[in-house]
């Protein structure tokens, strides 16, 4: 049995406690108040990234070794658990991705973020809201055969579905019964179509405002359904590019606490600096934190981690308690994980120390400090 204490300003859902997190083996044993710790670093729960395509040159769809590579890179940015996320591809490639991701679930070494399952953003997307996804691979639930779908389900935690596509409502209900979260997105749904999706059991929303029908006051769409349904979670990409920071307070005012989830939506080119790279069959260009398609110029996805997203939120005036809830607590609750997502006795000791500029200083995963993190 090993015991250690982590001192600082401990970020809890409703307050910041100056004190020590007592860690025994891989769990949090207790929280001890200590006024002297008020000068210490901020201590937040390890980030949980539910929507991340790659990191550091590793693309989640390139197999188990690539998933391990991104897991190592993500951990050093404070992400202690994640869902490797596929984009629209052939069924054969999607199935290979699912098989590879499945082999990594729970297989994490101490120097990698833990794989919790996987997320499929595609192929069930509406063509007119495809964003950066290759239209050649888009399908509808009605035309997806059972022998194509069934092999994708074990380990699947979240799948994006455009609710207006033929067969979507029935598939959403089936997935809900299996405990798989349908995430409405890449959709031009009317308000009624979107509400039907949530009513059928869709639990969350893929990158709110991006690639969806929005807040047009004469023809409200998916974004309005997501913001006004208190049961629905919404993902937010807080890089300051995908959704203007001016809308962040609107989202947080509309959604109950714990229903907004920070996601990175990071591509394999994240963490590599500026330059060109391939996203499946599409070439992208990264320039100053913005990632666009070389052909057409559409935004392709994001290139900043959850550490930078938390920093952006706090700089915009959002309390760090709320930011930590968005980066940890809310994603854990969406997946039904009771062992992580907060700093509390009995939970996994997944902790991130942030310095005065909110940069990652140290990362603890399962009670052990990660070498060379921060
Ligand atoms: Zn994505």
Image (tube, rainbow, N blue to C red):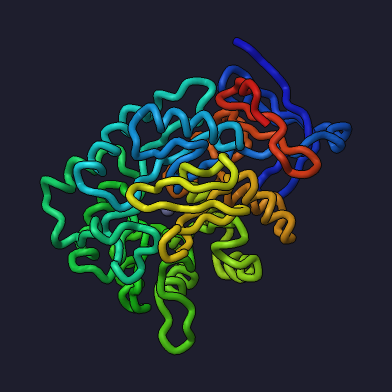
Q: Quadrant location of residue 12?
A: top right
Total numbered labels placed on residues in the image: 0
Q: Is residue 220 depicted above or below 122 in this figure?
A: below
Q: Is residue 74 depicted above or below 300 in this figure?
A: above
Of 328 and 337, which appears nearest the observer? 328
Q: Position of residue 18 (x, y in %)?
A: 80, 37
Residue lying at 35% horizontally and 45% vertically, measured from the top left: 157
Q: Quadrant location of residue 45?
A: top right
Residue lying at 42% horizontally and 73% vertically, measured from the top left: 225
Left or right of 241? Residue 280 is left
Q: Position of residue 71 (x, y in %)?
A: 48, 32
Of 100 and 299, which appears nearest the observer? 299
Of 24 and 67, which appears nearest the observer? 67
Residue lying at 58% horizontally and 47% vertically, measured from the top left: 274
Q: Position of residue 48 (x, y in %)?
A: 52, 41
Residue lying at 18% horizontally and 48% vertically, measured from the top left: 149
Left or right of 280? Residue 274 is right
Q: Is residue 71 depicted above or below 277 in this figure?
A: above
Q: Residue placed farthest to the bottom in the image?
A: 218
- For residue 90, say whether it is visible: yes
Q: Is residue 256 depicted above or below 374 in this figure?
A: below
- For residue 120, say whether it is visible: no
Q: Quadrant location of residue 98?
A: top left
Q: Residue placed farthest to the top in the image?
A: 1
Left or right of 103? Residue 326 is right
């Amino acid at each position: 049995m090993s015991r250690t204490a982590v001192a600082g300003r401990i970020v809890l859902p409703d307050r910041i406690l100056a004190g020590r997190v007592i860690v025994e083996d891989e769990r949090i044993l207790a929280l001890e108040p200590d006024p002297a710790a008020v000068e210490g670093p901020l201590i937040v729960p390890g980030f949980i990234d539910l929507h991340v395509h790659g990191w550091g040159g590793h693309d989640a769809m390139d197999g188990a070794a690539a998933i391990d590579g991104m897991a190592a890179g993500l951990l050093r940015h404070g992400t202690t658990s994640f869902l490797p996320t596929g984009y629209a591809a052939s069924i054969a490639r999607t199935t290979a991705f699912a098989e590879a991701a499945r082999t990594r679930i729970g297989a994490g070494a101490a120097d990698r973020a833990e794989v919790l399952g996987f997320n499929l953003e595609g192929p069930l997307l509406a063509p007119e809201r495809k964003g950066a996804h290759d239209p050649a691979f888009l399908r509808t639930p009605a035309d997806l055969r059972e022998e194509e779908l069934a092999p994708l389900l074990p380990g699947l935690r979240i799948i994006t579905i455009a609710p207006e596509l033929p067969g979507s409502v029935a598939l959403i209900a089936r997935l809900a019964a299996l405990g798989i979260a349908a995430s409405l997105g890449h959709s031009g749904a009317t308000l009624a179509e979107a509400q039907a999706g949530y009513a059928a059991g869709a639990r969350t929303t893929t990158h709110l405002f991006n690639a969806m029908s929005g807040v047009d006051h004469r023809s409200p769409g998916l974004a309005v359904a997501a913001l006004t349904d208190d049961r629905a979670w919404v993902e937010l990409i807080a890089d300051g590019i995908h959704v203007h920071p001016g809308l962040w307070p609107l989202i947080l005012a509309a959604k109950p606490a714990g229903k907004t989830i920070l996601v990175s939506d990071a591509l394999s080119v994240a963490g590599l600096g500026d330059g060109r790279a391939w996203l499946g069959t599409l070439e992208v260009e990264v320039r100053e934190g913005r990632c666009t398609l070389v052909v057409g110029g559409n935004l392709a996805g994001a290139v900043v981690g959850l550490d930078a997203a938390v920093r952006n939120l706090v700089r915009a005036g959002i309390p760090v308690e709320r930011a930590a809830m968005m980066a940890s607590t809310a994603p854990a609750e969406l997946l039904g994980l009771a062992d992580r997502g907060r700093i509390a006795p009995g939970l996994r000791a997944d902790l991130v120390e942030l310095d005065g500029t909110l940069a990652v200083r140290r990362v603890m995963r399962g009670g052990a400090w990660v070498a060379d993190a921060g």
